[in-house]
Amino acid sequence: MTVRTHALNGTTYRFDGLVDLLAKATPKRSGDELAGCAASSAAERVAAQWALADEPLATFLNEEVVPYETDEVTRLIMDSHDPDAFAPVSSLTVGEFRNWLLDVATRPDSSAILTALAPGLTPEMAAAVSKLMSLQDLISVPGAVQVTSGFRTTLGLKGTLATRLQPNHPTDDPAGVSAAILDGLLLGSGDAVVGINPASDSPQASADLLYLIDDVRQRLDIPTQSCVLTHVTTTIGLIEAGVPVDLPFQSIAGTEKANTGFGVTLAILREADEAARSLRRGVVGDNVMYFETGQGSALSADAHRGVGGRPVDEQTLEARAYGVARAFSPLLLNTVVGFIGPEYLHDGKQIIRAGLEDNFCGKLLGVPMGVDVCYTNHAEADDDDMDALLTLLAAAGTNYVICVPGTDDVMLGYQSLSFHNALAVRRSLGLRPAPEFEAWLERMDMADRAGHVVPRDPIGSPLAELVRR
């Protein structure tokens, strides 16, 4: 363990290894304070950021954050590193890398440069440089890179913002779910996925919901994909039973112990990926996995410790989860940025910063990144904070966001975005849905040629009768 020091205003600050340095350099975060790894003062945080800026990027290939011998996520990250892709930045420090990224973001070929770089970056490198960036920096760089994926729709194209239509219901009632799907479709939502969090964890309940969505999709000839967010092992069983599965889902985290707490291993994820690909249900692409993450998930499972037993900061662990996702070329990955609670992201300021960090790290690592712009009712946050984060993320080129009827998820009990929020930000920033979905909206006379949704009477809509069936 190499000790780092930095003198600031007559005080010399000591950082006991890379894990400690990364934690102390992280912008103020309630989860890191809870874990006992946060900087004790603003001055110590600034000193850590100065020291981190001087750290060679190559350090992250030689000094582990979580031990290689005991953690399969670390082994995946290290063993899949591409030294040729890393070569253009291999001589840089973290601070120099920040400057390099901001310069590249201004170039016409920025997306090609950053796409080629992604396999050469470890998640820890992405997390480190994000800690030195302003909010504006966190918007400029991911906005300059296009990370696409495809199944029945093409996601992540420049100038687009997709949405997950989330029609959750507290009892999985088919009529309630169908009404929410209709509401979302009429408001131009659902091009990323129609994804339901089931209230029941029974395989039969998940199968019933998958048949419901697939029936609506086929009746209306909707170019989208479906997902019921049950455990990945349940989904593997549903595939084997012949249920119409598009996308297996799984929550993942940045340590082996945290993933074990979710009941998954890399081998299980690989099995699900192979099973879903074997169905060949995609049209424009074969990206099949859907992952969700969130800063604080490893800490909440007491699975957040790294080298020497030291707590690793929650943002670095979050970036490591993207290293897991990257290995499976998913269709979708989103952070549920404010869902875990104020113990991990206390207020709107922390949630906004975390959402932009997550989008930045995911896209820099080559992951098709989305964000659930959300908060729980006991956090010091409100809808104004979510409006601000949504607008910033749209400017930063996030692939998709999650939308629910009226911002209130009545099953999960948290606040997300409404269908109207997505329409408003698309209109304000000149963004459009995924092209295949937009063409369907036009074909159904639900959008004009500018991609703007046309108001329709939900009762008299031709969609309503089909959904009622």
Image: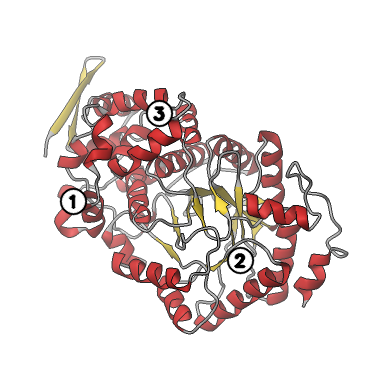
Q: Of the residues under marks 3 and 1, which one precedes in the sequence?
A: 3
* Residue under numbered circle 1: 309
Q: Which mark is residue 368?
A: none
Is disc 3 placed on a helix, strand or loop? loop
Residue in front for this viewpoint, 445 or 395 = 445
- What crowding class fits label 1: few (fewer than 14 Cα within 10 Å), some (14-19), or many (20 or more)? few
Is disc 2 placed on a helix, strand or loop? loop
Residue in front for this viewpoint, 302 or 87 = 87
* Residue under numbered circle 3: 133
- What crowding class fits label 3: few (fewer than 14 Cα within 10 Å), some (14-19), or many (20 or more)? some
Is residue 145 left or right of 436 when viewed as pictured? Answer: left
The residue at the point 48 percent across, 26 percent down is 108
- What crowding class fits label 2: few (fewer than 14 Cα within 10 Å), some (14-19), or many (20 or more)? some
The residue at the point 84 percent across, 55 percent down is 456
Is residue 296 left or right of 173 when viewed as pictured? Answer: left
State the count of labels: 3
Residue in front for this viewpoint, 212 or 344 = 212
Q: Amino acid at mark 2?
A: Met
* Residue under numbered circle 2: 411
Q: Of the residues under marks 2 and 1, which one precedes in the sequence?
A: 1
